[in-house]
Amino acid sequence: MEPALVLAVLGAGINFMDTGRSYFRGQNEVMVGRAVGARRKEVIIQSKLRVNLTGEQLKSREDINRALKQMEDSLAASLRALNTDYIDIMLIHGAEEASIIHHPEIMKFFEEKKKEGAIRAHGFSTHLNQVELVRAENGAGFYDVIMTTYNHKGAYVHMNTGRKSSWDQDALERELRQARERGVGLVAMKTCSGGPYATSAEVRPSYAGALRWIMQRNVVHTMAVAMASHEQIRENLRAWD
């Protein structure tokens, strides 16, 4: 998203910005920081860092220390790029294993960063094993925010990598509703990756309809929606008509 588009969505009343250290090698964070500028307090910025560990590496003290150092460096880089002294929500990017997100030292890192004021909420995003990870978090009860794939199709194909993912929609909604009851903030992604959707037989399928489907389900609190043009902004806003 270009700076002019960020300003356009802010002008339309959208105040949630999703970014990440991995996007365009950190330049997406730089762009968001510059575009938001003096309006920082009006905006909820969510970013992400990667935990470069596998379940097998959790047995290695050296590998854990390396991952924690990378997380520390990534958070510091995000703060600099966004030109801010705090990030509203910081997520583990692309979590796949519960043993990693619930490792005591990973959780300790996020709690310490909250106490320091560098982040205000923590969580994880997930493209795979969605049901299992949300269920594990419902058992652990640690994170503030969960970002998961969620759309009317229950599946998506990643536009860059071609990676496919699908999920049991009923099972995911059950786990998400339980998380919501516990007070966890829920963010949907890949919201338009299921294609256009018609909310009734009287209307044509559209991406606004796909977003409207999510809102009508009343499972998540908000959505991260990719918008690459002013026309896409206008179409997405029609979901609220």
Image (cartoon, rainbow, N blue to C red):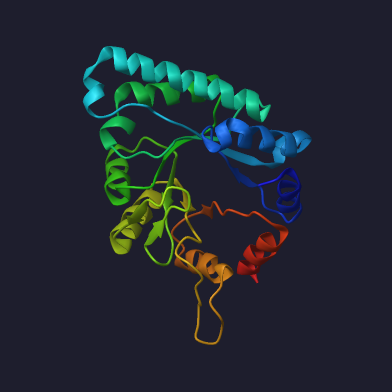
Q: Quadrant of the C terminus?
A: bottom right
Identify which residue is drawn at 63% across, 55% down: 227
Res 27 visible: yes
Identify which residue is drawn at 48% across, 67% down: 195
- Name the one closer to the observer, 66 or 142: 66
- Name the one closer to the observer, 241 or 70: 70
Q: How many marks?
A: 0
Q: Is residue 58 above or below residue 231?
A: above
Identify which residue is drawn at 47% across, 53% down: 159
Q: Is residue 140 above or below residue 164?
A: above
In this rendering, position of residue 3 left or right of residue 108? right
Res 88 visible: no
Q: Is residue 78 above or below residue 46?
A: above
Q: Quarter-wise, where is residue 76 in the image?
A: top right
Residue furthest bottom as drawn: 202
The percent position of residue 13, horizontal first and vertical second, equals: 71, 54
Q: Quarter-wise, where is residue 225 in the image?
A: bottom right
The percent position of residue 147, horizontal first and vertical second, equals: 44, 46
The percent position of residue 47, horizontal first and vertical second, equals: 54, 36
The percent position of residue 102, horizontal first and vertical second, equals: 30, 31
In this rendering, position of residue 124 left or right of residue 25? left
- Name the one closer to the observer, 104 or 35: 35
Identify which residue is drawn at 65% across, 66% down: 235
